Image: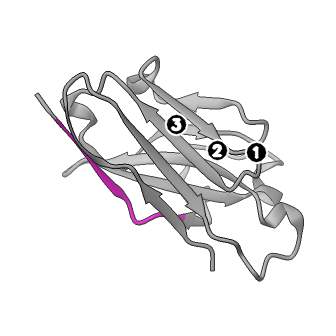
Amino acid sequence: QVQLEESGGGSVQAGGSLRLSCKASRDPSAYSFYDRQYCMSWFRQSPGKPREGVASVDKDGAPTYADSVKGRFTVSQDSAKTAVYLEMSSLQPNDTATYYCAAVVFSYCRGGYSAWNEDEYNYWGQGTQVTVSS
């Protein structure tokens, strides 16, 4: 079973920055090379609100962002396609949430998938808390 390990959450004041990291453990049962790589995304959930997509990296490494974070957040992935990062700047109080990393095996996502559809993902991290104070 693949595990996603997130790190980098914390508390900052408005206008501050944080960098989140998420790394996938190796899957010893992976059948092929493409089952050891992933398309990866970040979601977040604030209390009382549904989880929402924040940023995603597609099969070609191209990023996609929610409108609310465009120009402030930058998502990237390592060349092995087993880790994803989220650079967050100009943080605002409404960015306060638990941030989750999600991964879908590359053998599936290389054929195209809907990045904001949570059902597309095979694996989820436990979440890391980001708190922005005004």
CA separation, marks 3 and 2? 12 Å
Circle number at residue 79: 1
Choose mark 3 or mark 2, whichever is in front.
3
- The span shown in magenta is 124-132
Residue under the point 47% across and 63% down: 125
For mark 2, give the secondary structure: loop
Residue at far right of view: 32
Q: Is residue 81 left or right of residue 69?
A: right
What type is the residue that disc 2 sits on?
A: Ser
For mark 1, give the secondary structure: loop
Residue under the point 55% across and 34% down: 75
CA separation, marks 2 and 1? 22 Å
What type is the residue that disc 1 sits on?
A: Ser
Q: Relative to 12, say whether 118 is above or below.
A: below
Residue 4 lies in what quarter of the image? bottom right
Choose mark 2 or mark 1, whichever is in front.
1
Circle number at residue 114: 2
Q: Relative to 24, say whether 47 is above or below.
A: above
Name the residue that disc number 3 marks: 55
Q: First in sequence: mark 1 or mark 3?
A: 3
The foreground one among 72 and 115 is 72
Please, which colouring scheme is shown? one colour
Q: First in sequence: mark 3 or mark 2?
A: 3
For mark 3, give the secondary structure: strand
Q: Main secondary structure of the magenta part?
A: strand
